[in-house]
């Protein structure tokens, strides 16, 4: 009788499932999106290069989906082995009892952050940031962040109205380390350029700046979370 049991084979399959590099694949997609955003900041969001980088991002997403499917299929095979899909290692030949599904490594989820408007269930606008802070009050351990930056109210940037900038659907409470990381990123100079990311936003539409601002929030949360887990 072979020394390898059904349980051994199931465990081998589970080990194979765990070796599927989902984390690395997701990181690859993050890197591709970061490249796309950096190219957009330099060339503008409508350039031909952006279309090319979008194809790369789509390919990366397909890789992630394929890896997720592969892990699922391998874990199903492990469950089948454990549940009696192969020969039993016992003399009586009875099938092994069904086992509980193999635990899937916990997926790290990005914290879901609501704007102040979403937290309050309505939108309010203020004539200045000082007025906004006075009305909203403090939140321990957090700082109030503008998704579209305050500087974009200047005429030499985007010229958005102060009231629009200081509307609660454009403000979000962020933990201090996350807020500081976003501020540092916007002040950092782009590669091979004297222009900062903040400068690169000048003149972009409100919708585009808002989308990029939310992405900066998600990225900062991920970076802080990664630092905490090291």
Image (cartoon, rainbow, N blue to C red):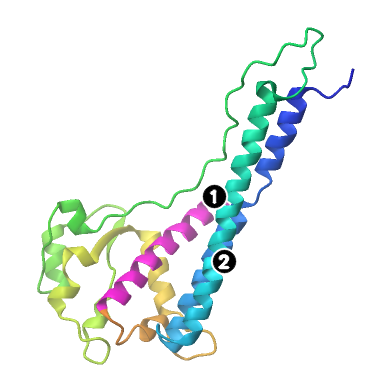
In the rendered image, residue 213 lying in the magenta stretch gets the answer: yes
The answer to whether 20 is drawn above or below residue 152 in the figure is above
Q: Residue furthest top?
A: 92
Residue at 31% across / 76% down in the picture? 209
Q: Give the quadrant of residue 114.
A: bottom left
Quadrant that contains the N terminus: top right
- Circle 1 residues within 10 Å: few <14, some 14–19, many ≥20: few
Residue at 71% across / 36% down in the picture? 13
Q: Which residues are magenta?
A: 206-230
Q: Which secondary structure, mark 2?
A: helix
- Measured as percent of width and height from the top left, residue 83 is found at 65, 22
Q: Is residue 189 left or right of residue 93?
A: left
The answer to whether 195 is drawn above or below residue 99 in the figure is below
| Badge nearest the viewer, 2 or 1 | 2
Q: Is residue 63 left or right of residue 50?
A: right
The answer to whether 215 is drawn above or below residue 190 in the figure is above
Q: Main secondary structure of the magenta part?
A: helix
Residue at 20% across / 64% down in the picture? 169
Please state the total of marks drawn on the protein image: 2
Which residue is the site of mark 1? 229
- Measured as percent of width and height from the top left, residue 51 is found at 48, 80
Q: Marks 2 and 1, Cα distance to the nearest angstrom?
A: 29 Å
- Measured as percent of width and height from the top left, residue 43 is found at 45, 88
The answer to whether 144 is drawn above or below residue 154 in the figure is above
Which residue is the site of mark 2? 59
- Circle 2 residues within 10 Å: few <14, some 14–19, many ≥20: some
- Measured as percent of width and height from the top left, residue 45 is found at 40, 82
């Amino acid at each position: 009788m072979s020394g390898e049991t059904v349980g051994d084979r199931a465990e081998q399959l589970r080990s194979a499932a765990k070796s599927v590099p989902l984390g690395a694949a997701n990181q690859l997609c993050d890197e591709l999106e970061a490249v796309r955003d950096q190219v957009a900041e330099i060339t503008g969001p409508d350039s031909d290069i952006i279309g090319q980088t979008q194809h790369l991002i789509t390919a990366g997403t397909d890789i992630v989906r394929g890896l997720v499917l592969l892990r699922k299929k391998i874990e199903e095979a492990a469950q089948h082995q454990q549940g009696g899909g192969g020969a039993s290692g016992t003399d009586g030949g009875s099938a092994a009892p069904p086992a509980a599904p193999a635990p899937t490594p916990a997926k790290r989820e990005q914290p879901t952050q609501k704007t102040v408007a979403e937290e309050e269930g309505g939108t309010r606008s203020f004539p200045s940031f000082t007025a906004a802070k006075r009305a909203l009050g403090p939140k321990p351990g957090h700082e109030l962040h503008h998704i579209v930056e305050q500087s974009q109210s200047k005429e030499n940037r985007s010229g958005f109205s102060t009231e629009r900038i200081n509307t609660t659907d454009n403000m979000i409470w962020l933990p201090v380390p996350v807020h500081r990381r976003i501020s540092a990123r916007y002040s950092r100079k782009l590669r091979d350029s004297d222009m900062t990311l903040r400068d690169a936003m000048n003149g972009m539409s409100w919708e585009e700046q808002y989308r990029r601002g939310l992405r900066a929030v998600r990225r900062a949360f991920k970076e802080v979370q990664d630092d905490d887990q090291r």
